[in-house]
């Protein structure tokens, strides 16, 4: 099938006429028109494809079907294309997913998807085998939900997808011929990533964004149980609500064991975060200065040795793992000197641990005000 992308922008294009936001202000008028896709010069797909005259009719041997994944088009040669607009445009009020039966499993040759809506939908498609290494993934409905084209390009690397200009013509026969067994997508993201940042810097959101399109994600929460603290309960709920339904969640501080068990390419660990893990290790090893007052036989050297051993185990497992790992940690070198001995001790230990993990990472970034700044070697 021949697919002509007449437009790749949002409903009003990008920039949107008359919009005063910073994203639209960075682009010249007409940069991307509203998304419009023409299949073999016969079928036109837009965000309101459900209202199209050709919906459900196989013109010229082509079949257009609406599913929970989007609009699936099968060509006369058996090639498959998926068009996935924003979920609000999929007419779910007319399509009951509970009564839809088993979802199809056949992989697509080409996926045209609104990745700015919920990029985790791409991860779910990969998890179910509908997007494979041989599937070409192209982002559409691009608009001011993202700050700039440069930021779009950065995210698409993590999502293993691409953007193309308006007017691009794609052909499923070319995709199959050029990549019969390989991956037509751009090079993928780094295997081990350390994201540093201060409180409320956006580092957790950045970590979640980076792995959103991965098929097999385990969220490793190292924070303490929320107990009865309303503020902490609200914070935990916020994090949980952001996670896609198909992610697994593991609450543990045995990070070395998790990294060792998940030593498989194709699996992803999101660790949030290293700072709370180290605080829990301090508790477990009774390494805080206050432990001296609670135990007359307290041995500070022994406690610090135990903490150092746990850090050594973590760094060694981080170095060996073949899974994709994105870890969040607190940057402790930019604030004031802590007023307490415990605060200074924790700052020093976490700073040293961050340095060690950074040395064993392919990618390190500092997140400030929601913007990631690469930290080069």
Image (cartoon, rainbow, N blue to C red):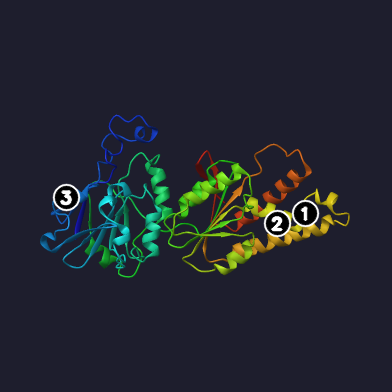
- Outermost residue to the left: 60
Residue corresponding to mark 1: 287
In this rendering, position of residue 174 left or right of residue 120: left
Percent x, y for residue 30?
A: 26, 37
Residue corresponding to mark 2: 281
261 versus 344 height, above or below: below
The residue at 33%/62% (across/down) is 184
The residue at 32%/62% (across/down) is 135
Residue corresponding to mark 3: 52
Q: Can you tell which of label 3 and label 1 is closer to the viewer? A: 3
Where, quadrant-wise, is the N terminus in this rendering? bottom left
Percent x, y for residue 168?
A: 24, 50
Q: Earlier in the sequence, mark 3 or mark 1?
A: 3
The answer to whether residue 48 is visible is yes
The residues tagged by marks 2 and 3 sit, at their Cα atoms, a distance apart of 59 Å
Label 2, residues with CA under 10 Å away: few <14, some 14-19, many ≥20:
some
The residue at 83%/57% (across/down) is 301
Number of marks in picture: 3
The residues tagged by marks 3 and 1 sit, at their Cα atoms, a distance apart of 67 Å
Percent x, y for residue 48?
A: 22, 47
Q: Secondary structure at mark 3?
A: loop
The answer to whether residue 69 is visible is no
In this rendering, position of residue 244 left or right of residue 16: right
Quarter of the image holding residue 358?
A: bottom right
Label 3, residues with CA under 10 Å away: few <14, some 14-19, many ≥20:
few
Q: Earlier in the sequence, mark 2 or mark 1?
A: 2
Q: Secondary structure at mark 2?
A: helix
In this rendering, position of residue 63 left or right of residue 201: left
Q: Marks 2 and 1: CB-CB under 8 Å? A: yes
144 versus 67 height, above or below: above
């Amino acid at each position: 099938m021949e697919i002509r992308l007449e437009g790749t922008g949002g409903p009003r294009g990008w920039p949107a006429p008359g919009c005063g936001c910073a994203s639209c202000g960075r682009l010249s008028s007409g940069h991307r028109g509203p998304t419009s896709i023409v299949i073999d010069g016969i079928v036109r797909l837009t965000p309101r494809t459900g209202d199209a005259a050709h919906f459900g009719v196989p013109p010229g041997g082509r079949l257009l079907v609406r599913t929970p994944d989007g609009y699936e088009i099968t060509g006369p040669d058996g090639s498959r294309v998926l068009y996935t607009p924003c979920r609000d445009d999929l007419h779910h009020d007319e399509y009951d997913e509970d009564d839809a039966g088993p979802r199809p499993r056949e992989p697509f040759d080409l996926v045209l998807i609104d990745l700015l809506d919920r990029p985790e939908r791409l991860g779910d498609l990969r998890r179910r085998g509908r997007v494979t290494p041989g599937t070409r993934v192209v982002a559409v409905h691009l608009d001011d939900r993202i700050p700039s084209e440069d930021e779009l390009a950065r995210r698409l690397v993590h999502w293993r997808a691409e953007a193309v200009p308006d007017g691009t013509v794609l052909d499923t026969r070319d995709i199959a011929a050029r990549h019969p067994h390989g991956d037509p997508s751009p090079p993928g993201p780094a295997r081990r990533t350390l994201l540093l940042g201060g409180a409320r810097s956006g580092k957790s959101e950045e970590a979640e964004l980076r792995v959103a399109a991965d098929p097999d994600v385990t969220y490793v929460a190292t924070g303490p149980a929320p107990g009865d603290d309303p503020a902490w309960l609200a914070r935990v709920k916020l994090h949980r609500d952001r996670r896609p339904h198909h992610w697994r969640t593991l609450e543990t501080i045995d990070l070395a064991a998790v990294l060792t068990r998940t030593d498989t390419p194709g699996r992803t660990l999101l660790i949030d975060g290293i700072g709370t893990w180290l605080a829990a290790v301090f508790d477990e090893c009774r390494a805080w200065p206050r432990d001296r007052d609670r135990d007359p036989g307290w041995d500070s050297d022994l406690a610090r040795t135990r903490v150092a051993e746990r850090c050594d185990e973590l760094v060694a497992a981080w170095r060996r793992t073949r899974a994709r790992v994105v870890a969040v940690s607190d940057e402790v070198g930019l604030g004031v000197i802590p007023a307490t001995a415990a605060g200074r001790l924790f700052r020093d230990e976490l700073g040293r641990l961050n340095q060690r993990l950074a040395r064993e990472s392919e990618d390190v970034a500092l997140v400030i005000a929601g913007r990631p700044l690469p930290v080069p070697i």
